[in-house]
Amino acid sequence: MSRNLGQHIATRLVELGVDTFFTVPGDYNLVLLDQLISDKRLKMINCCNELNAGYAADGYARVKGVACVVVTFTVGGLSVINAIAGALSENLAVIVITGGPNSNDYGTNRILHHTTGFADFHQEARCFKEVTCAQTEIFNLDDARLEVDHTIASAVRESKPVYLSICCNLAHIPHPSFSTSPVPYAIAYKQSNADSLTAAVDAAAEFLNKAVRPVIVNGVRIRVSKAHQALVELADACGYPVAAMPNAKGMFPEDHPRYLGTYWSVVSSPYVAETVESSDAYLVVGGAFNDYSSAGYTMLIKKAKMVDVQPHHVVIGGHQTFSCVIMKDFLKGLAGKLKQNATAWEQFDRMYVGLAEPPQSAPGSPLRTKSLFKHVQRMLTEDSAVLAETGDSWFNCQKLKLPKGCLYEFQMQYGSIGWSVGALLGYQAALHGKKRVLAFIGDGSFQVTMQDIASLMRWKFAPILFLINNQGYTIEVEIHDGPYNYIKSMDYVALVKAIDNGDGNSLALRVDTEEELEDAIEQAHKHTDGLVFIECTIHRDDCSRELLEWGSRVSEANMRPPNPQ
Ligand code: TPP
């Protein structure tokens, strides 16, 4: 019996390890959804809006490597696009499927609903061109199999989002091309050029073996290269200490004996900037430098001292470039060539003095951010995961010391507020209860996407969501203040209870003091079968030292005067 296009897509998703997809239904995608859910290996999670469905796919892809979000033509497509831009910025393979017009409407001058009112049905695809690495519109079934396979393979191979539009009258029609094969679809991955690889490894070894105090700096692009383990093995082999750039937090084990902490210019962990910047050679693996990760371009890093290892090429000393070199192959090759050198670690260890925990606050005194994160640190175990929303949570969570196995995610390149609510949903769906997720979100960000805590409740996920209510956009206050940084206050606990509506099995608490926080955390530990929401009321100007420092530097960078003409 012939299978249909919808069934074929479902099979491909399952083959890639996808067991859940996210959606907002619309009349253009309903028939496709019928086909997807008829495959019992796929679970559908429908969200309150497309932005959150896209963020959920982002969160899911961070765990599973690939995710899928299904939306409807144009109204859905353009609504999900901001989340997909975020996925692009984080190199996440998110497959966006939109239900498109009836195939007979292409080439006519009909005006369709949910469009901008022009007989141009490619507008949505053009919009996605900017945020996906492949776009395919399926108008006929004869070529559909090859086109679908090619598009999905592009997402996996490039680790980037792709766009697939399926005409609304095609997904359910049997066609012989969709017969299953006993062999799953094979994806051709990139390979290193053997000569380039050898030359790059030899040149890097020569460069680094001459150095007195070499260090390793771990960057975010290690994710797209899947080179986490290769980096650990290299660090073990050479004895160099390892610092993580802020956007790579959680990608290198923080319990490693020579882990330094975060390298983030002036807001680095104690003694880390000094160690990295005074080194005579740094091996930067997967580094992505921007104005935020460099704290307003204030890093004292010189290309002449750097071995810059990118996913597909290596640059040594700022001038020797080796292309067609895959990061993982390079790290493995280098591990066999570097001389042991723990000098930088020994120097760090001699001068290092750890930070003291803040003392217990006086009874009844207002809750401080520093006290909150003291307790959060104590909550973390190997069974935890942390999601940090854009805002002061970036800085407070960055300072957490992650126990072995504790996962960590945030969206630093794109920094779209509200990301963490949807991402939390997708992250939970992918983790299958393996970790207790602690999410940290400011009140400003929460107001963007909060309705999808309904989906967290509906699908019975049990994260602990800390709402940091500092009555406004504090991160922006520290960059540039004005009346626009004040927001409407809300009764967030009442809101969560209203969304729960008696069947969400959630626990919602507000805490104003350290003792109340301790009590709430105790309750959260016991309430393991539903969402725990803890609103922490924090003074408007109570923020991390790092945000103050970073904010003034980013402000300085933003306000550079125009060059004279
Ligand atoms: N719109 C989007 C979609 N993303 C953004 N990053 C911004 C606007 C600009 N922005 C950056 S942070 C921020 C805004 C509006 C405020 C965050 O406030 P909140 O979540 O309360 O965190 P806090 O800074 O108070 O910790």
Image (cartoon, rainbow, N blue to C red):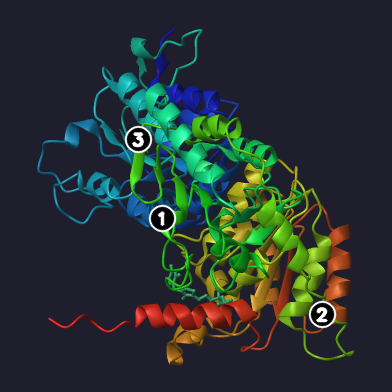
Sooner in the amino-acid sequence: mark 1 or mark 3: 1
The residue shown at (81%, 53%) is 381
Using the rendered view, name the quadrant where residue 370 is placed.
bottom right
Residue carrying label 2 = 358
Q: Nearer the viewer, mark 2 or mark 1?
A: 1
Say what amino acid the circle numbered 1 marks: Ala
Tell me if residue 157 can be seen.
yes
* Mark 1: secondary structure: helix
Residue carrying label 3 = 323
Label 3 crowding class (10 Å Cα cut-off): few <14, some 14-19, many 20+? some
Label 1 crowding class (10 Å Cα cut-off): few <14, some 14-19, many 20+? some
* Residue 155 percent across, percent down from the top left: 41, 35
Q: Nearer the viewer, residue 160 or 201?
A: 201
The residue shown at (54%, 35%) is 331
Residue carrying label 1 = 304
Sooner in the amino-acid sequence: mark 2 or mark 3: 3
Sooner in the amino-acid sequence: mark 2 or mark 1: 1
Say what amino acid the circle numbered 2 marks: Pro
* Residue 192 percent across, percent down from the top left: 41, 26
Q: Assign the C terminus to one quadrant of the image.
A: bottom left
User: How far apart, in angstroms, are the residues tagged by discs 1 and 3?
Assistant: 18 Å
